[in-house]
Amino acid sequence: MVSIQNLHKRFGKNQVLKGVDLSINDGGIFAVLGPNGSGKTTLIKSLLGMVIPNKGNITVLGENVKKNSNYRHQIDYLPQIANFPSNLKVKELIRMIKDLRGNTTEDLRLIKLFKLEPFLDKKLGNLSGGTKQKVNLVLTFMFDCPLIILDEPTTGLDPISLIRLKDLIQAEKAKGKTILITSHIMSFVEEVSDEIVFLLEGQIYFKGSISALKTKTNQPNFEHAIASILTDNHA
Amino acid sequence: MLKILKYSFYDLMRSRWSYVYFAFYLLLGIVLLFLNNDLSKAVITLMNVIIVLVPLIGTIFGVMYYYSSKEFTELLLAQPLKRSSIFLGQYLGVALSLTMSLILGLGIPFVFYGLFESSAIWDFSLLLITGAFLTFIFTALAFNIALSNENKIKGFGYAILLWLCLAIIYDGLFLMTLIMFEDYPLDKVSLIGTMLNPIDLSRTLILLKLDISALLGYTGAVFKQFFGTNFGLMVSFVMLTVWVLLPVVRIVYKSKKKDF
């Protein structure tokens, strides 16, 4: 599904990714974890072609991402902070994205699911953070793509919406899709993900299942396992 | 690209600034016609305003739009769209809406005053065409500046500096060189110097069309010989087109290499 070879990225003097090699197979939920500034978002943005790597090769579904925009038809992306043009209405934004990507009727179901009907005629600038995130989720899940990338999907969501989001993610997984998630909420990661990829100082420190991580770090619980990696490497 | 153009254009058409800009030209046109009571004189006054103001508005508006639509751009970048079409679409959206404000704002009062029965129609059209060119040139330059500077304050600073250089400082330096080298034949140099600055080029083009080149003395005669002919007019328009194309090419090039 996704294959990354020897990926390097530098922002000025700051070397963010230092030779990342990663291959992600079809189907399943993968969590990309790491401390702040470890390069999670940079990795995801390189996949999307928003960040242009200094070195290395990325292929998504067999297509090289370099100088290509077509492969993005196969990706649903949920950006980290839902910053939408503030003088657009929710309805107009949804219509615009449909106009750009192709038609779908799935949005109606998702709007109902997240109870967004009362906000459809409101401007995006006037919405609360959580509501914006719900709009963001609708925009991401309304297309039927084999690869879904979620950057901090839980930000600002209330408990009910969080449950709905988890159900939504499981439903997509059941369709055989590949889902990439970054999150700092460890309980969420533990609950949904099949496999984790741990980034540390621009390299992949660990890739495998959560139980494998627990054995590797000798910790009974996931949160402590992550914490032990961080203290061991920073102490 | 056309879809992006459409959304940028609609977005701008709904913003207050387009109306302010439109209303300003409308007012300017009406006031000038009332005060002058003469179409050709109004055209000359308008030229002086347009030559300075259009580049300023184009630069400021271009930089402002780029920075304020950053989120929208990032949303678009994750969609299956080419980078060049995103940025060219936005650029054309800004440039077209500014041009429309200019043409409608000035055009409406002049049409009501009886432009179509007057002989000033060609001068007036030339004025609007150069105004449109200047809008396209300076919006493109503004996009270049904004693309190269993440920092908004810096971006605005450079944009104003660029306008100041081309609208005022260039003329000063140009005049100084002419005075310093006055012992040499300077007609070719001054012709080339005029060609290299879009603001000067537009001004000369309109002045000579207005048949007041006698005021410019000997150089005016040389200029008249050049710009007054069809060949000169063609060369000038080619130069203005080059001034649009170069920054647009750089927008495409720069946007392909940028990280978001």
Image: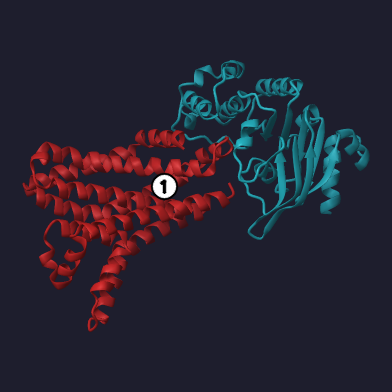
Chain colours: A cyan, B red
Outermost residue toward the front in this view:
B231
Relative to A180, is B174 on the left or the right? left
Outermost residue toward the bottom in this view:
B183
Name the residue that disc number 1 marks. Answer: B64
- Image coordinates for residue A152, horizontal then vertical, percent: 67, 35
> What residue appears at the point 18 percent right and 42 percent down from the top-left corner?
B27
Element type at mark 1: helix
Q: Residues within 10 Å of mark 1 (few under 14, many from 20)?
A: some
- Amino acid marked by disc 1: Met
Outermost residue toward the left in this view:
B37
Relative to B70, is A35 on the left or the right? right
Question: Which one is nearer the viewer's eye here, A50 or A133?
Answer: A50
Question: Which one is nearer the viewer's eye here, A3 or A171?
Answer: A3
- The reply to whether residue B146 is in sight is no
> What residue appears at the point 21 percent right and 50 percent down from the top-left corner?
B127
Q: What chain does mark 1 sit on?
A: B
Task: Give the total number of marks visible in the rendering.
Answer: 1
Relative to B181, is A63 on the left or the right? right
Q: Is residue A93 above or below residue A227?
A: above
